[in-house]
Image (cartoon, rainbow, N blue to C red):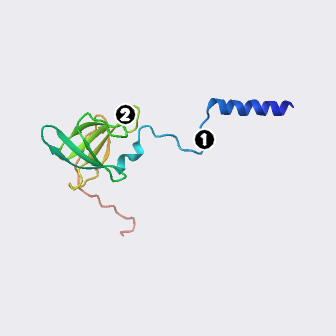
Amino acid sequence: MRISTRYLILCSVVVLTGMRDPFHPPDDLCAAGQLAQWRYQGMVEGITTVGILQDGQKRWHRVRKDEHLPVGWRVISINEREMVVDVGVTCDPARWQWQREGTKTNENKDNALTDGAQRTNSNSKTNAGHARGG
């Protein structure tokens, strides 16, 4: 009798505290997993600058500076080469940059921005030597 009462109390505590399913992945409130799926296609300049994005489901979005995208990111800057969004203060990464599709690619294409980081455009390739001259 005592064992079944203890078991019932333990199960009640687990159910009442709302423990999440350990086999279910945690919710991605920042939608950081979607960042690499979006593409910056370009901009239209007029009275206001409008950036043109395509999301992972191939839907098109027109955004202006300081607008929020459907996933919650805020557009910080738009120019002819890149767009920068603020993902969120508590998110990792906090800011993300997309380069326009069709521009010359480099190793910094579509990446996270860190405060104080400088971008380098080094296109030099290093040759890796093999121990036996291969």
Q: Residue at x 65, y 30 (%)?
A: 16
Residue 88, disc: 2
- Residue 32's place in the image compared with 3, above or below, is below
Q: Nearer the viewer, residue 133 or 123?
A: 123
The amino acid pointed to by label 2 is Gly
Residue 60 position, x and y percent, is 29, 49
Tell me: 42 left or right of 37.
Answer: left
The residue at 59%/37% (across/down) is 20
The disc at residue 78 is none
Dot 1 corresponds to which residue?
Answer: 21
Disc 1 from disc 2: Cα separation: 26 Å
- Tell whether 41 sits left or right of 69: left
Q: Secondary structure at mark 1?
A: loop
Q: Position of residue 64 (x, y in %)?
A: 23, 38
Q: Are marks 1 and 2 in contact (CB under 8 Å)?
A: no
Residue pictured at 72% horizontal, 34% vertical: 11
